[in-house]
Image (cartoon, grey):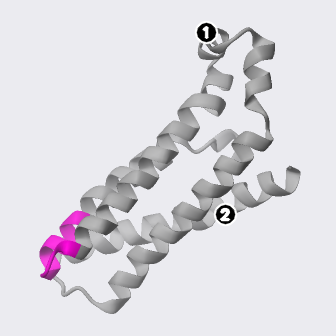
Amino acid sequence: MDTLQFIHSYWAYLVLVVLVLATLNALFKFFGNKEFEARDFRISLFTLITMHIQLLIGIILFFTKDYFSTIEQVGGMGEVMKNSALRNLIVEHPTTMIIAVVLVTMGYSKHKKKLVSKPKFKMLAIFYTLALILVLAKIPWGLWF
């Protein structure tokens, strides 16, 4: 379980770097009226892949940590919701990260349906920026540094 936590924590650095790169790439090329290239496609695809891998690791970690026992031990979900640390760990972080992965997936899917560069970058910029904001808001910074 410690190995899985280690992988989840350090893979998160890669996810964050790739998500920032993909978001900035989409924003700069959208506002710069640049052409969509194969490299842009690969950046957005790699972002999608790394985020989905992180989600799978997180889901496995969630169930191997047995948070259901923790919920039971503290007296139920009502008590979890009163404790900000537990609420963040068991509810807010997983939920927010799932939403971020959904946003990246939607942006990636929508950009593929566009035929010209500007709308492609627009879809990526909107959805990846929203996902980045959510990821930055719910990274457990205290555990990272």
Q: Residue at x 81, y 15 (%)?
A: 73
Q: How dense is the environment of label 2, judged by Cα within 10 Å: few (below 14), some, or many (20 and up)?
A: some
Q: Position of residue 109 (x, y in %)?
A: 30, 67
As displayed, is residue 90 above or below residue 44? above
Q: Residue at x 33, y 74 (%)?
A: 25
Element class at badge 2: helix
Residue tagged 2 = 11
Q: Residue at x 59, y 15 (%)?
A: 81
As displayed, is residue 81 above or below residue 134? above
Drawn side of residue 139 relative to residue 101, left or right: right
Element class at badge 1: helix
Residue tagged 1 = 78
Q: Position of residue 7 (x, y in %)?
A: 75, 60
Amino acid at the residue labelled 1: Gly
Q: Is residue 32 magenta?
A: no
Q: Is residue 145 at least partly visible in the picture?
A: no
Instruction: Give the image quarter of residue 29.
Output: bottom left
Q: Is label 1 or label 2 in front? A: 1
Which residue is most to the right? 2
What type of secondary structure mainly makes up the magenta span? helix
Instruction: Give the image quarter of residue 40.
Output: bottom left
Q: CA distance from mark 1 to mark 2?
A: 32 Å
Q: Position of residue 117 (x, y in %)?
A: 16, 81
What is the span of residues highlighted in magenta in the rendered image?
113-123
Drawn side of residue 20 relative to residue 67, left or right: left
